[in-house]
Protein backbone atom coordinates (compact mmCIF):
# COMPACT_ATOMS: atom_id res chain seq x y z
CA UNK A 1 0.00 0.00 0.00
CA UNK A 2 2.75 2.45 0.93
CA UNK A 3 4.68 1.68 -2.24
CA UNK A 4 1.63 2.64 -4.31
CA UNK A 5 1.26 5.86 -2.34
CA UNK A 6 4.97 6.61 -2.68
CA UNK A 7 4.86 6.03 -6.43
CA UNK A 8 1.73 8.15 -6.70
CA UNK A 9 3.28 10.95 -4.68
CA UNK A 10 6.40 10.88 -6.86
CA UNK A 11 4.29 11.05 -10.06
CA UNK A 12 2.16 13.84 -8.60
CA UNK A 13 5.14 15.98 -7.59
CA UNK A 14 6.75 15.56 -11.01
CA UNK A 15 3.37 16.24 -12.66
CA UNK A 16 2.82 19.41 -10.64
CA UNK A 17 6.29 20.71 -11.49
CA UNK A 18 5.63 20.01 -15.17
CA UNK A 19 2.27 21.81 -15.01
CA UNK A 20 3.90 24.90 -13.52
CA UNK A 21 6.80 24.87 -16.00
CA UNK A 22 4.51 24.25 -18.97
CA UNK A 23 2.12 27.03 -17.94
CA UNK A 24 4.86 29.58 -17.23
CA UNK A 25 7.14 29.09 -20.24
CA UNK A 26 6.87 30.59 -23.72
CA UNK A 27 7.45 27.57 -25.94
CA UNK A 28 4.02 26.14 -26.67
CA UNK A 29 4.36 26.91 -30.38
CA UNK A 30 7.27 27.88 -32.62
CA UNK A 31 6.87 29.41 -36.05
CA UNK A 32 8.62 31.41 -38.73
CA UNK A 33 7.46 35.02 -39.00
CA UNK A 34 9.00 37.57 -41.37
CA UNK A 35 11.99 35.34 -42.02
CA UNK A 36 12.92 34.74 -38.38
CA UNK A 37 11.78 32.24 -35.81
CA UNK A 38 9.32 33.22 -33.12
CA UNK A 39 7.69 31.34 -30.27
CA UNK A 40 4.72 31.82 -28.01
CA UNK A 41 3.33 30.55 -24.77
CA UNK A 42 0.14 31.19 -22.87
CA UNK A 43 1.30 34.56 -21.52
CA UNK A 44 3.84 35.98 -23.98
CA UNK A 45 5.10 35.71 -27.53
CA UNK A 46 8.69 36.34 -28.51
CA UNK A 47 10.14 37.60 -31.79
CA UNK A 48 13.70 38.73 -32.56
CA UNK A 49 14.85 38.12 -28.98
CA UNK A 50 12.13 40.39 -27.54
CA UNK A 51 9.07 39.15 -25.69
CA UNK A 52 5.67 40.83 -25.53
CA UNK A 53 2.55 40.17 -23.49
CA UNK A 54 0.15 37.83 -25.23
CA UNK A 55 -2.82 39.65 -26.71
CA UNK A 56 -5.36 38.59 -29.28
CA UNK A 57 -3.69 40.68 -31.99
CA UNK A 58 -1.03 38.04 -32.69
CA UNK A 59 -3.76 35.53 -33.45
CA UNK A 60 -5.86 37.74 -35.69
CA UNK A 61 -4.99 36.71 -39.21
CA UNK A 62 -5.95 38.66 -42.28
CA UNK A 63 -7.27 35.54 -43.98
CA UNK A 64 -10.51 37.12 -45.05
CA UNK A 65 -10.80 37.89 -48.78
CA UNK A 66 -14.03 39.86 -48.27
CA UNK A 67 -14.69 43.56 -48.11
CA UNK A 68 -12.82 45.66 -45.56
CA UNK A 69 -15.95 46.27 -43.43
CA UNK A 70 -16.88 42.58 -43.32
CA UNK A 71 -13.27 41.61 -42.61
CA UNK A 72 -13.07 44.03 -39.67
CA UNK A 73 -16.30 42.64 -38.19
CA UNK A 74 -15.06 39.07 -38.54
CA UNK A 75 -11.62 40.04 -37.25
CA UNK A 76 -13.27 41.43 -34.10
CA UNK A 77 -15.05 38.12 -33.54
CA UNK A 78 -11.80 36.27 -34.18
CA UNK A 79 -9.97 38.46 -31.66
CA UNK A 80 -12.58 37.65 -29.04
CA UNK A 81 -12.40 33.93 -29.87
CA UNK A 82 -8.60 33.79 -29.68
CA UNK A 83 -8.54 35.68 -26.38
CA UNK A 84 -11.21 33.35 -24.97
CA UNK A 85 -9.24 30.25 -25.97
CA UNK A 86 -6.05 31.59 -24.36
CA UNK A 87 -7.97 32.44 -21.20
CA UNK A 88 -9.60 29.00 -21.10
CA UNK A 89 -6.26 27.24 -21.58
CA UNK A 90 -4.64 29.37 -18.88
CA UNK A 91 -7.52 28.82 -16.45
CA UNK A 92 -7.56 25.05 -16.89
CA UNK A 93 -3.78 24.82 -16.45
CA UNK A 94 -3.93 26.90 -13.26
CA UNK A 95 -6.86 24.86 -11.90
CA UNK A 96 -4.97 21.68 -12.73
CA UNK A 97 -1.92 22.85 -10.79
CA UNK A 98 -4.09 23.77 -7.80
CA UNK A 99 -5.93 20.42 -7.84
CA UNK A 100 -2.63 18.55 -8.12
CA UNK A 101 -1.15 20.52 -5.22
CA UNK A 102 -4.21 19.77 -3.08
CA UNK A 103 -3.86 16.10 -4.06
CA UNK A 104 -0.21 16.15 -3.00
CA UNK A 105 -1.23 17.55 0.40
CA UNK A 106 -3.91 14.85 0.78
CA UNK A 107 -1.39 12.26 -0.39
CA UNK A 108 1.14 13.31 2.24
CA UNK A 109 -1.56 13.22 4.91
CA UNK A 110 -2.51 9.69 3.82
CA UNK A 111 0.83 8.48 5.21
CA UNK A 112 -0.21 9.67 8.68
CA UNK A 113 -2.74 8.07 10.98
CA UNK A 114 -4.89 10.78 12.51
CA UNK A 115 -7.87 9.26 14.31
CA UNK A 116 -9.95 12.36 13.52
CA UNK A 117 -9.96 11.30 9.85
CA UNK A 118 -10.78 7.63 10.46
CA UNK A 119 -13.93 7.66 8.32
CA UNK A 120 -12.37 9.78 5.58
CA UNK A 121 -9.95 8.05 3.22
CA UNK A 122 -7.16 10.47 2.40
CA UNK A 123 -5.73 8.16 -0.27
CA UNK A 124 -9.11 8.11 -2.03
CA UNK A 125 -9.35 11.92 -1.82
CA UNK A 126 -5.82 12.27 -3.20
CA UNK A 127 -6.66 9.93 -6.09
CA UNK A 128 -9.79 11.91 -6.93
CA UNK A 129 -7.87 15.20 -6.83
CA UNK A 130 -5.24 13.79 -9.18
CA UNK A 131 -7.94 12.66 -11.60
CA UNK A 132 -9.50 16.15 -11.44
CA UNK A 133 -6.08 17.62 -12.19
CA UNK A 134 -5.76 15.22 -15.12
CA UNK A 135 -9.14 16.33 -16.45
CA UNK A 136 -8.19 20.01 -16.25
CA UNK A 137 -4.87 19.46 -18.05
CA UNK A 138 -6.66 17.40 -20.69
CA UNK A 139 -9.21 20.17 -21.27
CA UNK A 140 -6.45 22.79 -21.54
CA UNK A 141 -4.43 20.71 -23.97
CA UNK A 142 -7.43 19.80 -26.13
CA UNK A 143 -8.56 23.43 -26.35
CA UNK A 144 -5.07 24.62 -27.25
CA UNK A 145 -4.52 21.81 -29.76
CA UNK A 146 -7.89 22.25 -31.45
CA UNK A 147 -7.64 26.00 -31.87
CA UNK A 148 -4.01 25.85 -32.94
CA UNK A 149 -4.62 23.18 -35.57
CA UNK A 150 -7.80 24.70 -36.94
CA UNK A 151 -6.96 28.38 -36.68
CA UNK A 152 -3.50 29.54 -35.64
CA UNK A 153 -1.63 26.87 -37.59
CA UNK A 154 -3.20 28.14 -40.80
CA UNK A 155 -1.80 31.59 -40.17
CA UNK A 156 1.79 30.42 -40.02
CA UNK A 157 3.13 28.25 -42.83
CA UNK A 158 6.15 26.85 -41.00
CA UNK A 159 5.13 26.07 -37.42
CA UNK A 160 5.26 23.30 -34.81
CA UNK A 161 4.32 22.58 -31.24
CA UNK A 162 7.24 23.00 -28.87
CA UNK A 163 8.53 21.67 -25.57
CA UNK A 164 6.21 23.61 -23.20
CA UNK A 165 3.25 22.07 -25.00
CA UNK A 166 4.79 18.59 -24.77
CA UNK A 167 5.41 19.07 -21.03
CA UNK A 168 1.68 19.70 -20.64
CA UNK A 169 0.86 16.28 -22.12
CA UNK A 170 3.53 14.60 -19.98
CA UNK A 171 2.09 16.33 -16.89
CA UNK A 172 -1.32 14.93 -17.78
CA UNK A 173 0.10 11.40 -17.87
CA UNK A 174 1.92 11.89 -14.56
CA UNK A 175 -1.18 13.13 -12.74
CA UNK A 176 -3.22 10.29 -14.26
CA UNK A 177 -0.74 7.68 -13.01
CA UNK A 178 -0.66 9.38 -9.61
CA UNK A 179 -4.44 8.96 -9.45
CA UNK A 180 -4.16 5.30 -10.46
CA UNK A 181 -1.52 4.62 -7.79
CA UNK A 182 -3.57 6.27 -5.06
CA UNK A 183 -6.73 4.41 -6.08
CA UNK A 184 -4.80 1.14 -5.94
CA UNK A 185 -3.52 2.08 -2.47
CA UNK A 186 -7.08 2.86 -1.40
CA UNK A 187 -8.33 -0.52 -2.70
CA UNK A 188 -5.56 -2.35 -0.85
CA UNK A 189 -6.35 -0.46 2.36
CA UNK A 190 -10.07 -1.24 2.04
CA UNK A 191 -9.45 -4.93 1.33
CA UNK A 192 -7.11 -5.22 4.34
CA UNK A 193 -9.64 -3.45 6.54
CA UNK A 194 -12.42 -5.85 5.45
CA UNK A 195 -10.20 -8.89 6.02
CA UNK A 196 -9.09 -7.52 9.41
CA UNK A 197 -12.69 -6.96 10.58
CA UNK A 198 -13.65 -10.64 10.07
Image (cartoon, rainbow, N blue to C red):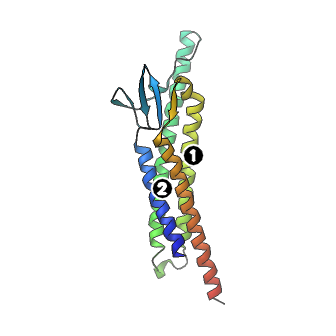
SS category of the residue bearing label 2: helix
Residue linked to disc 2: 15
Query: Which of these two is toward me, 135 or 75?
Result: 135
Q: Does residue 128 appear in the picture of this structure?
A: no
- Cβ atoms under marks 1 and 2 closer than 8 Å: no
| Residue beneath the point at 49% across and 26% down | 59
Quadrant of the snapshot with the N terminus: bottom right
SS category of the residue bearing label 1: helix
**Residue 74 shown left or right of residue 112 in the figure:** right
Query: Residue 41, position in %: x, y?
Result: 44, 37
Residue linked to disc 1: 139
| Discs 1/2, front | 2
Which residue lies most toward the bottom here? 198
Quadrant of the snapshot with the C terminus: bottom right
Looking at marks 1 and 2 on the same chain, the residue that comes earlier in the sequence is marked by 2
Query: Residue 169, position in %: x, y?
Result: 53, 47
| Residue beneath the point at 55% across and 64% down | 127
Q: Residue 101 lies in what quarter of the image?
A: bottom left
Q: Does residue 69 appear in the picture of this structure?
A: yes
Decide: few, some or many residues near mark 1? Use Cα within 10 Å; few <14, some 14-19, many ≥20. Answer: some
Query: Which of these two is toward me, 27 or 97?
Result: 27
Query: Residue 80, position in %: x, y?
Result: 51, 29
Can you say whether 177 is above or below 115 in the image? above
Query: Residue 96, position in %: x, y?
Result: 50, 52
Can you say whether 2 is above or below 39 in the image? below
Decide: few, some or many residues near mark 2? Use Cα within 10 Å; few <14, some 14-19, many ≥20. Answer: many
| Residue beneath the point at 55% across and 68% down | 182
| Residue beneath the point at 56% across and 66% down | 181
Can you say whether 80 is above or below 15 in the image? above
Amino acid sequence: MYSFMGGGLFCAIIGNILIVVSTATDYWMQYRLSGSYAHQGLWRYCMANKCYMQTASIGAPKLFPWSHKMASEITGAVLWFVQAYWNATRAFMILSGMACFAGIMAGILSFTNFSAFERFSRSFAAGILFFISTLFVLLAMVIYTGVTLSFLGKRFGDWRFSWSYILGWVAMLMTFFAGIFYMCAHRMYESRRVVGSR
